Image (cartoon, helix red, strand yellow):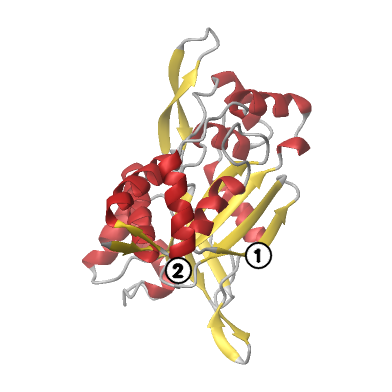
Amino acid sequence: MKISSNEILSRLLDNLWDTYIQRVSYAKTYADLVRSKGGKVRNDHIAFRTFNTITGKQPHGIGAIWHILDAFGFKPISNYTFTEKKLHAVHFQHADEKFPKIFVSQLEVPDLPQWAQNLINEQVVNTPYHLSETAVLDLLELNEKDELEEAAVNNLVRELTSYMSRPWGIPKQESIEKLNEISQYAAWTLIHGNSVNHFTAFINYQEVPEWPDLQTTCEALAAAGVPMKANIEGQKGSKLQQSSTQAVSETVDVILPDGSKGQMPWTYAYYELAERGFIEENGKQVLFSGFLGEQATHLFEMTKTNK
């Protein structure tokens, strides 16, 4: 029996969501509240962070995620540059609008001070490629035929789910803390690697009458005890409004200064919420599907850890 590319993608995204809500309780709270009111949980986009530097046998930078998205039919839509943060990003979309957009960013490591480059490169230069030859061949077949034999699907989804984690070894505590002084993005990515950075609720499809927009949804989450971002990015009625929960903190493994394995607290992820407005496109009113650089810059800061 053949399984379609879209069905395989649905299974992968479900796995990533299930893993994410186990780590980000605020996202689960949102989903539970919406469903309790008869609403729908639909995600607008998923974000990933990467390093644009040699990462061993794994494709570097945005390519680390892109080559997987390509096999499932995602296409690059727009490029974004965040000069101050030394970041570049691409957002990808699938032809089937039920699937979330994917926002993949990369830190331009060569633009950092030499000492910071050294700390990152030392950690990631020998990264193995965590997909088996079988999985790679299955991705190629999926790209060509848009379907796979059922026997191959479970293994492929399992390997891809595992791939969305940190691909390199346990980072040094000292490296994390030093990098955090100049780039919280660098420190976060050194710790979490290919893990999902965040999912994003698509408020337009929420269908909860009591929460008709982003503002009322944020107020409801705050009333339920979810710590929220202090303000909403974008004006009411604009083409994109965004907010988020605060980021959860986790205990992460690190290599201590004496070379032993230890642990320390660090931020993981927040749950974003987005409401899209209409724009005119080819004479028709359609929902804006892109991203706004200044707003995205502010949301990058939601994973900041003060040390």
Q: Nearer the viewer, residue 280 or 4?
A: 4
Name the amino acid, label 2: Leu
Residue 184, compared with residue 222, is above or below; it is above
Query: On residue 78, which mark appears?
Result: 1
Q: Residues within 10 Å of mark 2 (few under 14, many from 20)?
A: many
- On the question of residue 228 being in view, the answer is no
Q: Residue at x 41, y 33 (%)?
A: 250
Q: Judge left or right: residue 305 versus residue 86.
A: left
Q: Nearer the viewer, residue 103 or 267?
A: 103
Q: Residue at x 25, y 65 (%)?
A: 35
Residue 261, compared with residue 80, is above or below; it is above
Query: On residue 37, which mark appears?
Result: none
Where does label 2 land, which residue?
214
Q: Residue at x 59, y 19 (%)?
A: 174
Marks 1 and 2: CB-CB under 8 Å? no
Name the amino acid, label 1: Ser
Residue 241 x %, y %: 54, 68
- Quadrant in the rendering for residue 190: top right
Residue 233 x %, y %: 57, 62
